[in-house]
Amino acid sequence: MSNSKGVIFDLDGVIVDTAKFHFLAWRKLANDLGFDITETQNEELKGVSRVKSLEIILGWGGVTLTEDEFMEQMAMKNDNYLSYISGMTKSDILPGVSEIIDFLKENDIPIALGSASKNARNILEKVGLYQSFDAIVDGNDVSKAKPNPEVFLSAADQLNVAPENCVVFEDSVAGIQAANLAKMTSIGIGEEAVLNEADHVFTDFTEIEIDFIKKLVTK
């Protein structure tokens, strides 16, 4: 393991916002079954598995499905979600992210992706960031979900950087907990009240000064 620093990014809510595409796909499913769901209701589905999400939505609509219909609806939801993300472009990268990735690349700081998404590689290709990452660990590579630190420890290992020399950007409580368990520096992207276990919290990347990043990766 080298003494150099490494930076690990989560994907959804950090580099891109795919939550809106999940909402559109779930809403289409609900509409096809004869009812509607709101963005407020959709908030309750964040971080919830696909099966559990569908059970909750069916409860909202008062709809009962056979097991076969249930599986069919789940597959259709995923197909719709994939068709939405297939249209993603560079413009879907969240504000401020590209500048920080560019700075890290220019200064030879290795970067990895640590995401639960099974579509992570596909999404990075779409938004033109695939080549920027030195390592990618996604939902196809790990078996334990955050807050288990497996995804981040695996990313550090691939970067050949000791976990305590890694910095993690995360937008979820479970992700921050995973970074903390891995003894990494955790940086929350979102609301301070929610992500208060993080070492640092910023509303989004536009709030992060390059000087702050410089200090993190050079000390």
Image (cartoon, grey):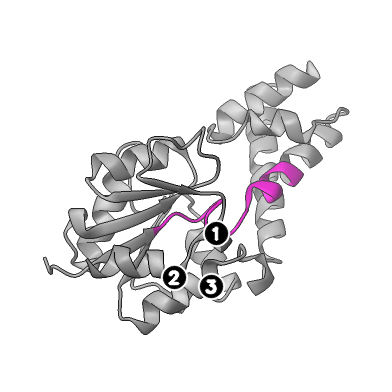
Q: In this rendering, which labeled residue sits more in front, label 3 or label 1?
A: 1
Structural crowding at the residue carrying mark 2, measured as other residues with C-alpha within 10 Å and reported as few (<14), some (14–19) or many (≥20) = few
Structural crowding at the residue carrying mark 1, measured as other residues with C-alpha within 10 Å and reported as few (<14), some (14–19) or many (≥20) = few
Quickly name the residue at label 3. 98
**Residue type at tag 2:** Ile
The location of residue 92, given as percent across then percent down, is 66, 65
Whether residue 103 sits left or right of residue 42 in the image: it is left
Look at 65% across and 56% down and name the residue there.
82
Residue 207: numbered disc: 1
**Residue type at tag 3:** Ser
Q: In this rendering, which labeled residue sits more in front, label 2 or label 3?
A: 2
Quickly name the residue at label 2. 210
Does residue 15 appear in this view?
Answer: no
Q: Which of marks 2 and 3 is nearer the N terminus?
A: 3
The location of residue 150, given as percent across then percent down, is 27, 45
Q: In this view, does 130 lie above or below 81?
A: below
**Segment colored magenta:** 9-24
How many dots with numbers? 3
Structural crowding at the residue carrying mark 3, measured as other residues with C-alpha within 10 Å and reported as few (<14), some (14–19) or many (≥20) = some
Viewer-nearest residue: 26 or 206:
206
